[in-house]
Amino acid sequence: APRVTSFSRSPLLPRKLLPCCISCRSFRFSVKASSVQTASEGLQVKVFQQENYLANWIQALFNSLPLEDYKDGVLVLGGDGRYFNREAAQIIIKIAAGNGVGKILVGRDGLMSTPAVSAVIRKQKANGGFIMSASHNPGGPEYDWGIKISEIKTADIPDVDLSSVGTVRYGNFTVEVVDPVSDYLELMEEVFDFQLIKDLISRADFRFSFDAMHAVTGAYAKPIFVDRLGASLDSISNGVPLEDFGHGHPDPNLTYAKDLVNIMYAKDAPDFGAASDGDGDRNMILGRGFFITPSDSVAIIAANAQAAIPYFKDGPKGLARSMPTSGALDRVASKLNLPFFEVPTGWKFFGNLMDAGRLSICGEESFGTGSDHIREKDGIWAVLAWLSIIAYQNKDKKVGEKLVSVADIAKEHWASYGRNFFSRYDYEECESSGANKMMEYLRDIISKTKQGEKYGNYTLDFADDFSYTDPVDGSVASKQGLRFVFTDGSRIIYRLSGTGSAGATIRIYIEQFEPDVAKHDVDAQTALKPLIDLALSISKLEEFTGREKPTVIT
Ligand code: G6P
Ligand code: ZN
């Protein structure tokens, strides 16, 4: 049996240990401050890599869990391939053994995407899992989190060879190195009609480009898109997971997924382009010279799901979006007569509704789309959903006939539901005190607003600080974003990011509904200009932050 060594160390205090998703019960730890916050900022990699630093954190996690959650149980371990994951995997395995875990299922080379971890937890009926990721944040030596505990129980076992699939036993403790793709791929084959997608991908008149951003979906793209669905190898770019993501920022948006944007906006662009983030749960969808906003993406998937995706053949049970996500999905829910939920930002709010059987398809403006096949958002799933829709709409098209394009699908959707113009302005790394003062100032304004007040050409319907009561367990989440909602349905929303790692990130979300088809082709920034100007003037953003321009616009 593994020998257990206990020792004391580390005077640093934890702020929060964050379960990444309550319902799938996996725990993300982060090598940057994005998901675990710190008591002391700016700790360097050298500090973090000192003996027992990570060990403390993992032990604290075990200490905080009830024994029945892991004792003799099965845990899954995966990660996005970032710097330090290999060493971290060995530390976690030993501490799991030292705490009496029965078995660890670990992805080969420590790799497994976040959605795949969720899929494996569900399929293998594991107790939970660890995801070594800082999601869409860059990999590199900026670690700032710390913890304090009194004891670490680590087992005295050798490092496990993670490079090939197989099982090793140490007494009652087992480590099984698994293929990170197979359970996930099996699930995808249950959800989608792979033959339908294959028929599209193998057409000579359809070209597809997937950008793995040198992150974890690199390990999934070739087995799924190339080997299984017949895409050509050159349709995958940045397909090798690298510890520093090739110096990139693995967040699939118009700013950071520049390679893909250049490909899709070039003269001879492919028909369909997509990218995923560091740990494979986010996605971006592009047509030829055409960007699908995440808010439109979830609405279009929901509208077409029953026809194009076998998993939804009886129709989705319900639809949901996060509050700042545009109302495009609301219109689909109302037309299809489906239950609809508006929840705060963060995937965990969807999980409860899914567990209660009330929700099938959901999405967030922050490039997250998914369904109740797992309890995480899922980048590859979103790509397969779009491929299914394109395939379904073109299934009777003969060679030489013009295909229904991504842009055609979006425009047809707008024609039947109206278009929700949407844009998000991010002001990253603002000085915290200015950002907080701005939010307080806005709260004060909101407390004095009255229905019917004029704001330029807009008339206020209501303004509030969004609060959500979970319909399943009755829990209340308050202060989830400041909203100004106007009588024509236009909205301005202000939120402070919960995932930024330095200073404060202010997000302004702007939305305007346009029923008139003749106006659907206007550029979103042009259509939203009056509302954007209004958002900046109401908040006095420049005065509070000194910022003239946003860092990222999506
Ligand atoms: C993570 C969560 C998402 C959420 C996003 C919000 O990615 O998994 O569910 O939408 O954070 O990030 P923000 O920076 O806006 O708080
Ligand atoms: Zn992610």
Image: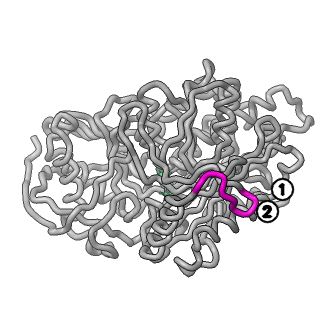
Query: Picture coordinates of residue 336 (x, y %)?
Result: 67, 26
Task: Determine whether the residue tagged by mark 1 lies in a helix, strand or loop.
Answer: loop
Q: Residue at x 61, y 35 (%)?
A: 228
Would you place residue 521 above or below residue 434 in this image?
Answer: above
Q: Residue at x 66, y 38 (%)?
A: 299
- Between 158 and 426, which is closer to the camera in this rendering? 426
The reply to whether discs 2 and 1 touch (Cβ–Cβ < 8 Å) is yes
Query: Picture coordinates of residue 510 (x, y %)?
Result: 65, 57
Q: CA distance from mark 2 to mark 1?
A: 7 Å
Q: Quadrant of residue 74?
A: top left
Ligand 1 within 8 Å, label 1 CB: no
Query: Picture coordinates of residue 116 (x, y %)?
Result: 45, 40
Q: Is residue 451 visible?
A: yes
Q: Which residue is mark 1?
A: 522
Please tell me whether residue 455 belongs to the stretch shown in magenta: yes
Amino acid type, residue under disc 2 in the picture = Thr
Residue 526 is labelled as 2
- Between 75 and 470, which is closer to the camera in this rendering? 470
Task: Determine whether the residue tagged by mark 2 lies in a helix, strand or loop.
Answer: helix
Q: Residue at x 12, y 51 (%)?
A: 153
Please tell me whether residue 92 belongs to the stretch shown in magenta: no
Q: Residue at x 28, y 35 (%)?
A: 127
Question: Mark 1: few, some, or many residues within 10 Å (few <14, many ≥20)?
Answer: few
Pick the quarter of the image with the N terminus: top left
Ligand 1 within 8 Å, label 2 CB: no
Specify whether 506 is left or right of 393. left
Would you place residue 8 above or below residue 190 in this image?
Answer: below
Pick the quarter of the image with the C terminus: bottom right
Report the span colored magenta: 450-458
Q: Main secondary structure of the magenta part?
A: loop
